Image (cartoon, rainbow, N blue to C red):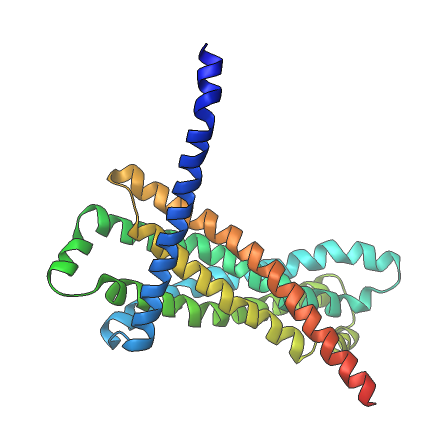
Amino acid sequence: MGFIQSLRSFPERLGGVVMDKVCRIGEFGYFIAQMIRWLTTRLPCKGTILPCFYQIGVQSLPVVALTGTFIGMVLAVQSYTQLKSLGMETRMGALINMSLVRELGPVLAATMLAGRIGSSMAAELGTMRVTEQIDALTCMGTNPIHYLVVPRFLGCLLLIPILALMADFMGIVGGAFYSVYLLGIDSHFYISNSQSFVGLYDISSGIFKSFFFGGAIGVISCYRGFNCRAGAEGVGRAATEAFVNSFVAILLLDLLMGIFLEALYSMIWAGSSKLF
């Protein structure tokens, strides 16, 4: 009887789960719509934007620079043996720099920043929700979306691409240092091959992805903080969910942007080849 009763209640439980997910998607969409409305209506004042920019941009420089440097060195270590066996070790510059500027630099920098910035923003806003500071802002006539969310979203949207560019630069420097000074690769061929194979399109495509990564980190982290559950456990869960959801969004956006950019590149290359 217990199994039959459980089987009968399964559609009801499934419907409850589906309705809960639909309601969460609706809440997330309404949250984004409110943020866009305030973003296009009135920008926050300098006193609220600059602290967010400092926290997101300046304080993240050391960890991003360190991450980018070690990414370049690891790529040099992993690719040297395989390329040397083919007699193509002088092409390491092209391989390392292409991998960095198109994929690894923006994605790993955004992942690192999702853990550092996203979790921090979600925990900060979650604590404000638990201690009723957000409700106090509403009672004082200040819109919490405009005062708390928009500055953080702008900081992530504008500064994470710059930080990704910093990670690319440090990765290129780290890979060149390890390849030239520790592996003994000729610097002339290393630099010339890098210039031949890595172009402006490769760099701009990675930076283009970073805008979407930054926007996703800002929106998801602020939403999780705003909808934090009560108690210290709720704050910790909001920070964890902010990082996990941001990481999944980064991977999904990387796939979609990669498909779009490859199709765009093929279209442009095909069009130019027809002209000549």
Return the x and y of residue 167 as percentages of the image width and height. 55, 66
Residue furthest right as drawn: 86
Answer left or right for 29 relative to 65: left
155 to 234, vertically: above or below: below
Asked if residue 166 shows in the view, the reply is yes
- Who's the residue at 48% across and 15% down the image? 4
- Image quadrant assignment for residue 252: bottom right
Residue 214 placement (x, y as % from top left): 46, 64
- When the figure is inspected, residue 20 is found, relative to residue 142, above or below; the finding is above
Q: How many numbered marks does the figure carry?
A: 0
Question: Which residue is depicted at the point 45% across and 55% down?
Answer: 114
Residue at the limit of the structure toward the left, as seen here: 140
Height in image: 134 above or below 259?
A: above
153 to the left or right of 183 = left
Q: Examine the rendering and report whether any part of residue 152 can be seen.
A: no
* Left or right of residue 141: residue 260: right
In the image, residue 232 lies at what x, y percent?
27, 39
The quarter of the picture where the C terminus appears is bottom right
Q: Name the one closer to the observer, 208 or 196.
A: 208
Q: Residue furthest bottom?
A: 276
Q: Residue at x 32, y 67 (%)?
A: 150
Residue drawn at (73%, 54%) of the image:
78
Residue 32: x and y in percent read: 37, 62
